[in-house]
Image: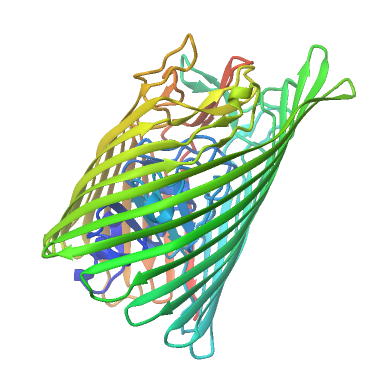
């Protein structure tokens, strides 16, 4: 986060607050974060470590108006930005890891084992990044190989028998090449017991690694090749029956074996060729997700519902772009983009009825292909920068669907189809920035957002087979300021989003499953503020605040229910983060410094459902850490949720049982870590 860049262990005080001036690549043109005409936040590796951010959900609410409800598994990870998001289906925020786009919501939550930095742009980024970036764009980078031989290790131990080991090795290869290898293993025994069998309900094991090779073939051509893999396994889930009247969650108590088992890997190549006035960049990647989801869906000791789902997803992505590489007043970029996805899914929905066991068997074979042409130009005129961009997106989707019913030992064929959809869209963006001096940037932008339509997974009526795309027009204006003495910075923005055909989750008519439908009109409006202040070379403070007012304007659920005027679900009224760091330098000691950190993050009230009947009240969490830095070693002590705040992490309903289920918040925990630079 830009406001805590000041915690960096820099020797020169003048560098400590300049995190907000870092050069970032989210626009595919390297620009200072203070000069781009959008709300953007950058987070360094050191900041992630101080925050004890082990995965993407740990930055929840630290970035203004960014909220990620925790499902308890990595099957789906929802990211809501300024009210834009969805609890099922394709993500509404674009995720890139080392320039590889992660399309599936089951891939975007992975272990932060060795992260160089992350960059988060809020607001649509469709002009340069295409479909499904209505909410924004998150880019995550891992370290590149360097020309010096290095090795690092880290051991982190905590309460609830949680531990994580991590190691990284960097090896130069010849004069202009190098390779970096890292790996990790993480275990947590879980926080909650399943009282049915007296075992932990949320135990989790994760391990994986990454190999990255980089070479400068000559002074013009360079290449990167990388591959990574992560295994995630948990033998249960910590959901209990939720009492809406008292907002309490019963103990976990279910009988059927449950698990989530995920394998995910990605491989990519990046080639960059630099000429005098422009550069050519090519990136290509392949990613594979394979997972199994077995769950006692009724979460009781009764044998009612069991769901067994297996997925096998592949994705191929290629992009070629050309961009200017000079000091001209006109900077430009243009490119071509293409992707292909293959999604296979088998679902066995087992139901015990008064007449015996019944299995609903569904098979999905979906292929999605798409391509795009895009371009954007920036023109500097005195103290103004004018920017305009345009993208044409084309997508084709085909679904082969089969539905059988197994009952009484007999297999009954119920339905099947082979249908296709196609979408095309033009995505423009216009912005103007005014830079009166080196310290101030004022900007205004208008951007179109777009998220493709698709096929539903649960289909009970012909009209529910598909859902349409959603669209938005986003208006934003803001100011960014850095004091001349570098002791203070402040960024503020206002936004308004006019939303058409919003994709929302509904229960299917039978109550056994969910589907995506389109609401009529919605809107979201609010503001964001990020500030940082360094009192002196030892003490600094930071503040992040986001406010969102998001509502359905027109949403007729059915003939009897109209949710127009209701709040959008899973959109907090506000997000808040307060931080402070004190760095105490010790003279004549082997300890270089002691860093004391404390942060408080708060989340405003939000609703779990479109009916606005169940909700989570506002809550806050206090975290703290103490870090001792030696020459080649670092020792830290951390504590999370120090006030042991109780709240609901996630909530869902099963209408056929007329019950709601939820998962409790993680309790207070402590830990210690040791990090060493071996050479």
In this picture, is 111 found above or below 267?
above
In this picture, is 270 found above or below 627?
below
Horizontally, is 112 left or right of 584 in the view?
right
In this picture, is 482 found above or below 604?
below
Comparing 144 with 430, the one in front is: 430
Query: How does the figure colour the protein chain or chains?
Result: rainbow
Q: How many marks?
A: 0
- Residue reaching furthest top? 560
- Residue reaching furthest right? 409
Please provide percent x and percent y for residue 678.
51, 78
Please provide percent x and percent y for residue 284.
55, 65
Comparing 441 with 553, the one in front is: 553
Q: Mark yes or no: residue 641 visible.
A: no
Horizontally, is 591 left or right of 261 in the view?
left
Q: Mark yes or no: residue 648 visible.
A: yes
- Residue reaching furthest bottom? 175
Horizontally, is 34 left or right of 229 in the view?
left
Q: Based on the displayed image, in which of its 4 quarters is residue 191 positioned?
A: top right
Comparing 253 with 122, the one in front is: 122
Q: Based on the displayed image, in which of its 4 quarters is residue 396 positioned?
A: top right
Please provide percent x and percent y for residue 551.
34, 26
Comparing 203 with 327, the one in front is: 327
Please provide percent x and percent y for residue 404.
79, 28
Q: Residue at x 23, y 59 (%)?
A: 34
In this picture, is 92 found above or below 143?
above
Q: Quadrant of the N terminus?
A: bottom left
Q: Residue at x 46, y 47 (%)?
A: 131
């Amino acid at each position: 986060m830009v406001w805590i860049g000041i915690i960096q262990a820099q020797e020169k005080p003048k560098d400590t607050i300049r995190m907000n001036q870092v050069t970032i690549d989210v626009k595919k043109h390297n620009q200072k974060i203070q000069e781009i005409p959008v709300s953007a936040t950058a987070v360094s590796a050191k900041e992630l470590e101080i925050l004890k951010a082990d995965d993407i959900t740990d930055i929840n609410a630290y970035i203004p108006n960014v909220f990620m409800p925790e499902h308890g598994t990595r099957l789906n990870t929802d990211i809501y930005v300024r009210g834009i998001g969805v609890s099922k289906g394709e993500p509404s925020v674009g995720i890139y890891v080392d320039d590889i786009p992660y399309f599936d919501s089951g891939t975007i939550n992975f272990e932060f084992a060795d992260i160089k930095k992350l960059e988060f742009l809020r607001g649509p980024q469709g002009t340069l990044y295409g479909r499904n970036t209505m909410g924004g764009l998150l880019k995550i980078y891992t370290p590149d190989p360097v020309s010096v031989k290095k090795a690092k290790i880290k051991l982190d131990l905590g309460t609830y028998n949680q531990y994580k080991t991590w190691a990284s090795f960097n090896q130069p290869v010849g004069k202009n090449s190098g390779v970096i290898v890292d790996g990790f293993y993480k275990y947590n025994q879980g926080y909650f017991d399943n009282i049915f069998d007296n075992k932990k309900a949320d135990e989790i094991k994760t391990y994986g690694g990454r190999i990255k090779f980089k070479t400068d073939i000559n002074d013009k051509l360079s290449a990167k090749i990388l591959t990574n893999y992560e295994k995630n396994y948990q033998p249960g889930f910590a959901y209990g029956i939720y009492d809406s009247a008292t907002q309490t969650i019963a103990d976990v108590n279910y009988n059927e074996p449950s698990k989530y088992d995920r394998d995910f890997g990605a491989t990519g190549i990046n080639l960059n060729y630099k000429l005098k006035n422009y550069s050519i960049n090519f990136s290509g990647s392949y990613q594979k997700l394979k997972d199994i989801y077995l769950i006692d869906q009724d979460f009781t000791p009764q044998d009612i519902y069991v769901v067994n789902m297996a997925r096998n997803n592949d994705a191929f992505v290629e992009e070629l772009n050309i961009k200017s590489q000079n000091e001209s007043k006109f900077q430009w970029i243009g490119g071509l983009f293409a992707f292909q996805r293959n999604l296979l899914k088998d679902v066995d929905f087992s139901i015990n009825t008064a007449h015996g066991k019944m299995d609903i068997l569904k098979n999905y074979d979906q292929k999605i292909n798409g391509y795009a042409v895009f371009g954007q130009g920036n023109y500097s005129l005195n103290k103004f920068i004018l920017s305009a961009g345009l993208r044409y997106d084309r997508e084709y989707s085909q679904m082969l669907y089969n539905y059988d019913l197994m009952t009484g030992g007999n297999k009954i064929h119920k339905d099947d189809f082979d249908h296709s959809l196609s979408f095309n869209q033009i995505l423009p963006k216009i912005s103007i920035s005014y830079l009166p001096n080196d310290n101030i940037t004022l900007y205004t932008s208008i951007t179109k957002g777009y998220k493709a339509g698709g096929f539903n997974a649960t289909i009970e009526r012909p009209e529910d087979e598909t859902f349409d795309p959603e669209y938005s027009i986003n208006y934003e204006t803001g100011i960014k300021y850095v004091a001349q003495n570098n002791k203070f910075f402040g960024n503020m923005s206002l936004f308004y989003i006019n939303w058409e055909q919003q994709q929302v989750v509904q229960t299917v008519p039978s109550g056994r499953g969910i589907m995506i439908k389109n609401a009529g009109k919605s809107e979201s409006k609010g503001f964001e503020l990020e500030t940082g202040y360094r009192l002196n070379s030892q003490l600094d403070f930071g503040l992040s605040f986001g406010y969102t007012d998001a509502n359905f304007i027109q949403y007729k659920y059915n003939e009897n229910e109209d949710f127009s005027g209701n709040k959008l679900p899973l959109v907090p009224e506000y997000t808040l983060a307060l931080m402070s760091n004190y760095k105490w330098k010790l003279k004549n000691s082997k300890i270089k410094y002691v860093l004391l950190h404390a942060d408080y993050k708060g989340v405003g009230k939000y609703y779990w459902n479109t009916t606005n009947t169940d909700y989570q009240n506002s809550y806050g969490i206090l975290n703290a850490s103490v870090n001792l830095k030696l020459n080649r070693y670092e020792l830290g002590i951390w504590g999370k949720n120090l006030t042991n705040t109780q709240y609901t992490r996630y909530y869902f309903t099963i209408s056929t049982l007329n019950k709601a289920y939820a998962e409790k918040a993680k309790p207070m925990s402590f830990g210690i870590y040791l990090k060493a630079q071996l050479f």
